Image: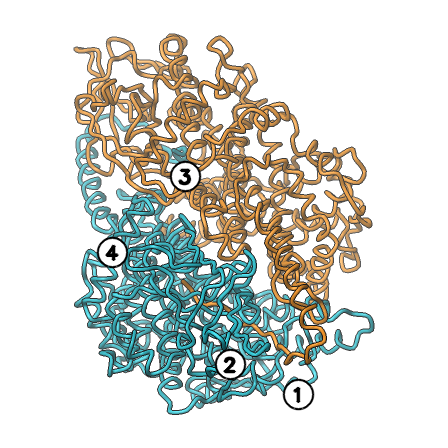
Chain colours: A orange, B cyan
Amino acid sequence: MTSSLPTSVDPARIQEVLDGRWAHVRRDARENLNDPDFLPVYGENVQEARERVTRAAKKLAESGRVGFGFPKEYGGEDDAGGSVTSIEMLAFGDLSLMVKAGVQWGLFGGALQMLGSRRQHDLYLRDVMSFDLPGCFAMTETGHGSDVQQLRTTCTYDPATETFDLHTPHQAARKDYIGNAARDGRMAVVFAQLITQGKNHGVHAWLVPIRDEQGQSCPGVTIEDDGAKAGLNGVDNGRLTFDHVQVPRDMLLDRYGQVAADGTYTSSIANETRRFFTMLGTLVRGRVSVGGSAASATKLALDIAVRYGDVRRQFAAPGEDREIVVNDYLVHQRKLLPALATTYALHFAQGQLVETMHDVQAAETIDEKAQRELESRAAGLKVAQTWHATRTIQLCREACGGAGYLQENRLPHLKADTDVFTTFEGDNTVLLQLVAKGLLTGYRDAFGSLEGWGKVGFIADMVRETVLERTAARALIARLIDAVPSRNDVEIPMLTRGWQLKMLEFREKHALEGAIRRLRKNSTTPGMAPFEMFNDVQDHVLKTAQTHIDRVVMEAFVAGVDRTDDPAAKRLLDAVCDLYALSTIEADKAWFLEHGQLTPARAKLLTSTVNQLLRDLRPHLATLVDAFAIPHGWKAARILDEEEARQEAMAARDAEVRSEAEGDSTPEESATDLQVAPAQ
Amino acid sequence: MTSSLPTSVDPARIQEVLDGRWAHVRRDARENLNDPDFLPVYGENVQEARERVTRAAKKLAESGRVGFGFPKEYGGEDDAGGSVTSIEMLAFGDLSLMVKAGVQWGLFGGALQMLGSRRQHDLYLRDVMSFDLPGCFAMTETGHGSDVQQLRTTCTYDPATETFDLHTPHQAARKDYIGNAARDGRMAVVFAQLITQGKNHGVHAWLVPIRDEQGQSCPGVTIEDDGAKAGLNGVDNGRLTFDHVQVPRDMLLDRYGQVAADGTYTSSIANETRRFFTMLGTLVRGRVSVGGSAASATKLALDIAVRYGDVRRQFAAPGEDREIVVNDYLVHQRKLLPALATTYALHFAQGQLVETMHDVQAAETIDEKAQRELESRAAGLKVAQTWHATRTIQLCREACGGAGYLQENRLPHLKADTDVFTTFEGDNTVLLQLVAKGLLTGYRDAFGSLEGWGKVGFIADMVRETVLERTAARALIARLIDAVPSRNDVEIPMLTRGWQLKMLEFREKHALEGAIRRLRKNSTTPGMAPFEMFNDVQDHVLKTAQTHIDRVVMEAFVAGVDRTDDPAAKRLLDAVCDLYALSTIEADKAWFLEHGQLTPARAKLLTSTVNQLLRDLRPHLATLVDAFAIPHGWKAARILDEEEARQEAMAARDAEVRSEAEGDSTPEESATDLQVAPAQ
């Protein structure tokens, strides 16, 4: 609901809203992590990159800024939200360092903290925090990344020796893509099927030495190198194979399942599946961090592309001496501004997610429903943020032309290093499926009745009516939607916030109901194999998840605008929210036309309304990236420092040439046209 | 118009159609360039990569397979089509080598050949071909890549010394991104404004020594290094700055413009703009090669992803022992198959383009209209192929999960190295503009009346009625379209080829007419600045170009299917063509709904028709990549060799475990669910 925009907005007022609950962590990072050693270096080979990043990780440990998430008694701050926020801030620097930190303190340290006992914390946690004990999180296998419950590594207890036998039965069961494995790791948290007294109790984790202090592999452990990757080459990913490695009984991380000396298994959670999900649920922080890191990289890419686009010029307008600033081109705005609006929207959604995560994890007892919802939300926002990062960084790199392909301008690093985010911490397509499943079952009885996603038995349990649970600012959203008359959509101005919300809500509800209807029909179709029942509607099901994520993100944005105090900042954010809403609807215009929610005339109006928003927001482009408050030293993009000076020098020289030419015979008219330099 | 598909199709029969007119060049490359030295190497630093690629380029020169495009009297084959085809084949190997070859023999050698005189050929061409004289193509400046006519480097003739003074007036005029500049190049073809007798005659090219045999920069020449790039690190891109460098008169490449000793300028083409475009037009081969190379990289990526998806399994279906092959998932098919269909379509369009280029360049005299059409077609297909490559390789990398992020599986190399294709040899957005402009003026009087694209004066000249010129197989296309009744579109089966063609033709015509209408209206709007007149409709104008390209590509595919002899191959290609057409229409469904070409019910039918095509084509996925006939040695993707064996080993072990478990108590039901390993 754009009212006319103020001519100028103080980015600091927007920054306050963006910085949110962990503003102190962001501020601290901006001031104290502004160290060239934490920035990327280019052109190194793999060994050089790994050595440098290991050194940087040690320096980071010494800075004392890696312990937010750990218990206070070990020097941490018991602050889950702070730990994710600090990772988000690290993601403005060398992303290899961020991932290395994430592996050491998030995954490895986090698993030890969440799944281990007090005794195990006492033994290892301080060394983990200081990086004196570099470690791995050995969950993924070559054969199983998305379906972790089906890991094939076994860990079989033998009461005679009081040890576990950890074994990789075949190459598909080797641990793969394991950070810290190829070079630095001395221990690993290894996930495997726990077998005792002839019975498999499902996936558990052990702390297993893999390399001695001299860097030699431990007996029975084979370590291979994953070698060069598309990016993140400062992280030493590798493969671990275990050949009947003997693991002492007390190395089982046994908070959720214990094995007595005689081999008797006990757990406070009797149901194996519930136990598995409870254990994994404690590790959600990693997924939340990946989404947030993707968002940071996206902000940095947009910052670079927007600033470059504000000084870069190409093609002269008739009658003008200077060429046109590329940000003035409609098509350039069409690229940058909707991406920027989505970045804002996702920022608010991520902020909300981190708060929820912090509160769920800070609670005395585990609220299974809340944990399950958190996981679904974390999955959905990880998908949205990482795909948005991949698309947006690509777009920013192209928007900077040849300069965007040079490492010195930072964008290639951002692209290559974040690329894996779409498939690690959960393949995005699989995570969308997870989100969809949560919607289909309305989270109800989630631990008990969910079965293999090829099965559709759970359809019988599905909720009868789909009532969408509103997220942030429930009362506000309800009020905005209720204010929209239900009959004459055709006349409602598109900048009406309630109309925008209603459109996204309608789409989600309709998609969800349609998916349920089709699944039900298939489940009663004679002769249809269970896999086919589901596969037949897989595209529809994933779309349902996408529509859900869009709505959740929109509601978070609306709540964020609502709590903005500064009137000018609020008006600007309001317009950015309009652009997010309308460009999201525009991107799926066909659906709204197909389902009678847009007439052809309204659909055309939508396009021109988006174009008008682009014109309105154009003067605020720089303000909107300023508000990210990325310290100049972190940007490290050479074009930002040089392009403006070059353009000024060229303008000065051109003016000289023009004045020299005055009085000469009129020069032959130069008919500029599009002709472009060949490739190199 | 799919009839039921044969159960199996011989890929060799499809390959014959794909190989086309230069089948002999492809066959020769498959047999004789199958050399590990021409494959990418990973994890190197920049210097290591450059040294290796320089060695490979010398080896390639020695193979005698770099001269297709050069005149027979210098050892070449006078075969323009063959030269592009050979570059396309090189693009299956190390893309740095392909680009290095493109710089040396395509751009540098090509400019010398096309713009130089017989005397200059005699002096240099053999050394260029043998790589004894490595050279650069110094056109792009930091400040001007897309608008080459506005280059700021000057080359001013002084009759007193009979030399040119080559000068870089400011940093925006330095030559940038120049391949072969940072390390190897000894000469450069430098583009600059030719000034003699006080008059600027526009952009011309000179052959300029930049580095002596000891590797020292020549006097007045400053060489800088562009440093590490996102990819293509085997190519030594750099910057050249000229400080009043004295260039002998006979180093002007003077085929199209000569300067006499006294400074008198002569040219066979009096009009400066026509001369400029004629000169640049001779260099179109580079752009055609980039599109074709992007296509090769895309094919290789699809080959890897399709084969991996045929053996990779994840998640078990209920009641099944083994997990599901990922290519069986609908959403995986939704990713791979439309991309594969588009790759086929673009292959046929590229084949047609290369033939046209060959014939235009082989002609005795320059046909300006044909050359202009060729340039527009080359621009459009370069855009289509490079964006398709960027999207598809990204998709393939994600489709391979974590394995797709490892260099050993080839996809990261393909992604990073082709990424720059979207902005070099013409920024894609600028090239779309070029295509649009060609459509708006109907190519008419192209050399005379086209002005700066910010100006809309040319609107007055625009064609009154938009009659689309059909491309390949004109009679066939006309017959297919005419066979479709014009009134009741609503009932025409979507697999009717004529309906598909008609939809794409209607969209182009309508978009074009709409753009013209809007431009005309703006041009008569009082007070609207000329830039605004155009900028206001820039998105519409670019869409027009896109619709044109889609139609041209579709017509090429239809012609390709038509000339397929083998009945089974033809039926399969027919279905692939259906998928290309319908997924292209589906991608722009909103437009067809908005413009009354699809009803909501038909729009839904379109989606289910595409899904049915995916099911029909699923059994032929492997055949369709087999037909690309990429030698196994060129693929060099480790997952292709290993994954199947791993899956078999796992299946065997799982069967053992099951048989051990028989007779035991029923195991607790394992409720598999989506749970995914954290990131590393």
Q: What amino acid does circle 1 point to?
A: Arg
- Residue B189 in view (yes/no): yes
Q: Would you place residue B244 above or below residue B547 in this image? A: above
The tag on residue B464 is 1
Q: Mark on residue A636?
A: none
Q: State the mark number for residue B39.
A: 4
Under tag 3, what secondary structure? Answer: loop
Labelled pair 2, 3 in contact (Cβ < 8 Å): no
Where's residue A466, x and y in %? Answer: 61, 42
Residue at which label 2 appears: B263
Three-letter amino acid code at the position of disc 4? Leu
Q: Which one is closest to the eye, mark 2 or mark 4? A: 2
Which is nearer the N-term, disc 1 or disc 2?
A: 2
Locate residue B412, reporting x and y percent.
35, 50
* Residue at x 18% of width, y 68% of height: B63
Between B348 and A216, the one nearer to me in the picture: A216
Would you call the spot at circle 1 few (<14 residues within 10 Å), some (14-19), or many (20 or more)? few
Q: Give the residue at mark 3.
A: A424
Q: Earlier in the sequence, mark 1 or mark 4?
A: 4
Indicate the amino acid at tag 2: Gly
User: Looking at the rendering, which quadrant does residue A569 occupy?
Assistant: top right
Question: Toward which corner of the image does residue B125 lie, by quadrant?
Answer: bottom left
| Of marks 4 and 3, the one in the foreground | 4
**Cα–Cα gap, marks 2 and 4:** 50 Å
Report the quarter where the C terminus of chain A lies: bottom left
Quarter where residue B254 is shown: bottom left
- The spot of residue A564 in percent (x, y) is 75, 34
Mark 4 falls within which chain? Answer: B
